[in-house]
Amino acid sequence: MASITTKELEEALSAKLMTNFGKAADEATDGEMMRASALVLRDMMALREVETRKKTRQNKKKQVHYLSMEFLIGRSLMKNAYNLDLLPQLKEALEHLGFKAGDIFEMEPDAALGNGGLGRLAACYLDSMTTLEIPATGYSICYELGLFKQKIVEGQQVELPDHWKDLGAAWLLPKPAEAQMVSFGGTVREFWADGHLHTVNENATTIQAIPYDMEIAGYGTGHVNVLRLWDPRPTKAIDMSLFGQGEYLKAAEEETMAETIAKVLYPDDNHIEGKSLRLKQQYFFVSATIQSITAKHLDTYGTLKNFHEKNVIQINDTHPTLVIPELMRVLIDDTGMNWDDAWYITTHAVAYTNHTVLAEALERWPQTLMERRLPRIWQIIQEISNRWQKRVESFYHDPAKTKEMAIIWDGQVRMANLCIAGGMAVNGVSALHSDILRNDVFKDACAMEPTKFQNVTNGIDHRRWLSEINPGLDGLIKELTGGDAYLSDASVLQKLDAYADDQTVLNRLAEIKRKNKEALAVHAKRSRGVILNPDAIFDVQAKRLHEYKRQLLNVLHIIALYQKLRDDPNAITQPHTFLFGAKAAPGYEVAKRIIRLINSLADQIENDPVCKDKLQVVFLENYRVSLAEVLMPASEVSQQ
């Protein structure tokens, strides 16, 4: 790939400012320059993505389709510039045009498309697959507000809308010509014709799904993959007759209902309306995705009989489980395939990544809701359930096992069991996790189909989480390993074992950590007015706020330390700072009370003279990827 000079990039940025914003560089705001920078890089990646897609089609390569309710990708400007090998040139071009590169990078909002580790795993996989030149596409919803922007007011979490698209939409490439139609509700009518049973869903509400593509650049390669985000639109934007009668709200009701699907990530489901919205979200993006994938496959091969040979659909947790009955629906209803052939293709194309070992956290849906909202899908799930249950009964002859492994039971649809029945593989994200699935959570299913249960250890995108955000450590590693080969081949990091007892290297490592802690202290003072002591041990627990994540256990530990310090002021010899970062789901009252407890404890310790320069607790507001990028390099103890 030919390298782009600073001058060429400077000219491209100036041209983009004029054509998109009607401004010269000396007139543009930081926000306009950020968007212009994104548009320039997006254009470069779009050209490469066309070539990638062309090669994939010509060579008829197998493709990965990664479905996830969230992709926690963070900011994209620095990441894409880094992967395109343009970061130094972009920084210089921005400076030459009169802007501070750091301010422009900081201007970009985190894309509000995810929340926790599940979403970050999805983002890391997309980056890695692209770098490895694996043809892959991610699929999710184009959320308008994401989860929420967290503010801490008087120690309590307050949720605010996260308007990330004001600037972040510059990365989105609309593809209205590839829109799909998704249907909800209605009634199912069946009739025989041409020797086949035909199924028609009548009187359904149809919503249009518009794809917005976010280009994903690989590191050191011209390969570009895509994150496809589906945006819901009404098929009839407004009822003009009602509008003319002055019934303005009712006239726009269909438009409002459609847009609600993409309004927020994980709407509160403590009530039936919330459950219904979540189910609609899941089916909306799954149905649009399957229709898109199968249409492109048909365009290339002219048949779906080899679909499983050319596509693998990876579902990230149970949220996209409806991909299984939806693929069956397309194969049977749209192409006239018989059940057995459709089931063979489906069970050889879909794989499931599990994210929880808590039985009570495994997703379940009320049968009545599924029947009402997705009548045809409900019919297919019933058939899958009946056939699966017969297999279980013939294998175990044990009613207790049948009950445990059933897909439909006691008025509920169990999504994890549907994944196991309809998938070709089930994996945990670490060896320990996968062992628990095999030996505990899904042990009966594993005994029945042992080869289906696998392990895929959850790695990270080490370019972002090491090289980009920790340049000091990156420089040391390159020096010790003889270059930058580790960026493309993480196994090179094994060379560092030779320096485990090298005091000179360990001292340099300590210096790098110290500088990273000082950088975090500057960030904390600027963003929260909090004074951190870089000489303290930075003890970090940053993740979703949930009872099983054990933040409360950590708080109890801190309280015990505090009481010990009150009894003996000399009990702590080295300063210790506990740093928390977490969002609690808006309807999760226990988690929100834990946040209040953390902040109350922080305030108590802050105002106790005994704790000065010895013990500190800090809750970092609005935890997200960009905050993690400052926090992780400074972390010394990671509370997992």
Image (spheres, rainbow, N blue to C red):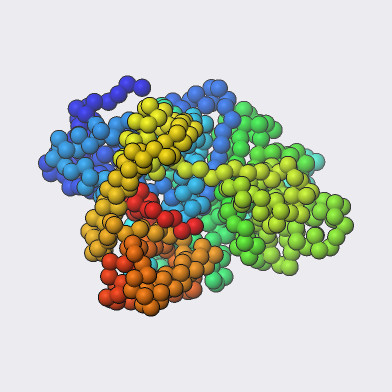
Q: Quadrant of the N terminus?
A: top left
Name the residue at 45% across, 34% down: 498
Tell me if I can see residue 458 in this picture: yes
Residue 53 picture location, percent across and down = 48, 29
Viewer-proximal residue, 53 or 458?
A: 458
Residue 601 picture location, percent across and down = 37, 74
Name the residue at 35% across, 38% down: 505
Viewer-proximal residue, 367 or 533?
A: 533
Identify whether 575 is placed above or below 348: below
Name the residue at 85% across, 55% down: 396
In the image: residue 419, left or right of residue 477: right
Identify whether 604 is placed above or below 422: below
Tell me if I can see residue 622 in this picture: no
Identify whether 44 is placed above or below 415: above
Outermost residue, left side: 26
Name the residue at 85% across, 51% down: 395
Residue 87 picture location, percent across and down = 28, 35
In the image: residue 110, left or right of residue 488: left
Viewer-proximal residue, 619 or 448?
A: 619
